[in-house]
Amino acid sequence: MGNPDFIFRSYDRMAVDHAHELRELLGNKPLVTRICIVSVGVVLHEAQNALLKIFEDPPSNTHFFMVSETDSYLLPTLRSRFFVHRERRVDTQDGEVEKFLTLSLGEKMTKVSEIAEAGTEATRRFMDELERNFSKDIKTYQNVLSKIIEGKRFLLLPSASRKGILESIVCAL
């Protein structure tokens, strides 16, 4: 049996139901001190509102850690309740975007299908890499960058089609 004072959850896309589950788990008194670790790709807007209820009146003797590659999608009111620790990103996929950009249109579509299948976090990470690449020349790639930023917003919607978002970015290239 696991430690009742240790909660770990991992979500590709944290929905409101997940936030409600956490609130329920945190409602029980800890035996000593509770540790709650949540690893997320993105937290949907409705889930953030539900999390706010937890952090407005946090449970006593509870330490809450939210682990994510970015906090850019968080509502300012939720972000203000966290101590944000940023790690310098170590890029292990040097040249992946450059290789991607040399592919034919059909190969690009196949590749974005694979990325979308890998989940929301992989999709967001790929979009971040594309954005970093095209940000080097904002004037030339303004339309592509706009499409990437728009895609990141759509990615936060509960019914977002990762594949459709990535395909629309490919069409803007």
Image (cartoon, grey):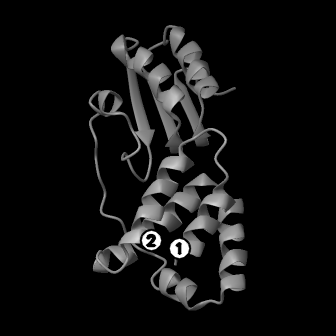
10 Å crowding of disc 1: few (<14), some (14-19), many (20+) = some
User: Is residue 26 found left or right of 89 in the rendered image?
Assistant: right
Horizontal and vertical percent position of residue 126: 52, 67
Q: Quadrant of residue 102?
A: bottom right
Q: Which residue was labeled with disc 1?
A: 172
Horizontal and vertical percent position of residue 63: 38, 26
Looking at this view, is 121 or 24 the one in front? 121
- Which residue occupies 56% across, 55% down? 121
What amino acid does circle 2 point to?
Answer: Val
Q: Is residue 103 shown above or below 79?
A: below
User: What number is the disc on residue 42?
Assistant: none
- Which residue occupies 41% across, 28% down? 64
Dot 1: what SS?
helix
Pick the quarter of the image with the N terminus.
top right
Q: Residue 131, can we see it?
A: no
Horizontal and vertical percent position of residue 51: 46, 23
Dot 2: what SS?
helix
Q: Residue 145, can we see it?
A: yes
Q: Is residue 32 shown above or below 142?
A: above
Horizontal and vertical percent position of residue 93: 49, 78
Q: Which residue was labeled with disc 2?
A: 144
User: Is residue 33 found left or right of 8 in the rendered image?
Assistant: left
Q: How many circles with numbers are drawn on the protein?
A: 2
Q: Is residue 157 shown above or below 53?
A: below
Q: Do tag 2 and tag 1 residues touch (Cβ < 8 Å)?
A: yes
What amino acid does circle 1 point to?
Answer: Ala
